[in-house]
Amino acid sequence: AQSGDLTVEEMIGGTFTISNGGVFGSLLSTPILNSPQSAILGMHKTQERPVVVDGEIVIRPMMYLALSYDHRIIDGKDAVQFLIAIKDALEDPTRLLLKV
């Protein structure tokens, strides 16, 4: 893949897609599932936004994540738990790197 030598046949049959529209400035979208895959995660532009922390309005970098999935395959509870795990990993990448 790194050398750019993948054939079309080698790129068929995935089960999950990560789409990073944020590199193009996308702030939010709903990714469309690529059949027959079970899910697609859309990651968007990180942008400073006002948020409330301990009762105070502060500016924090924020990024929207959007998960589209086939409800016939994936239960909604599992999808939300997956998004929470992704959020936690992005907010504290040292935990991911150190497997804490």
Image (cartoon, grey):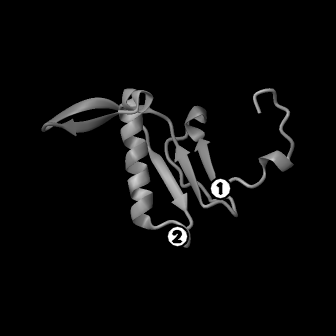
Q: Is residue 62 visible?
A: no
Q: Which residue occupies the extreme bottom position in the image?
A: 72
Q: Position of residue 19 (x, y in %)?
A: 60, 44
Q: Which residue occupies the extreme left position in the image?
A: 55
Q: Position of residue 18 (x, y in %)?
A: 59, 45
Q: Quadrant of residue 33?
A: bottom right
Query: Is 91 displayed left or right of 19 in the figure?
Result: left
Dot 2 alpha-carbon crowd within 10 angstroms: few under 14, some 14 to 19, many 20 or more = few
Amino acid bearing label 1:
Thr
- Quarter that holds the N terminus: top right
Residue annotated with mark 2: 71
Choose the circle earlier in sequence order: 1 or 2. 1
Query: Is 55 displayed left or right of 98 in the figure?
Result: left
User: Mark on residue 15?
Assistant: 1
Amino acid bearing label 2:
His
- Quarter that holds the C terminus: top left
Q: Is residue 77 visible?
A: yes
Could you give the CA–CA distance between mark 1 and mark 2, rounded to whole angstroms? 14 Å
The relative height of residue 38 versus residue 54 in the rendered view (above or below) is below
Q: Residue at 38% of width from left, 55% of height from top? A: 81
The relative height of residue 80 versus residue 71 in the rendered view (above or below) is above
Q: Residue at 50% of width from left, 35% of height from top? A: 45
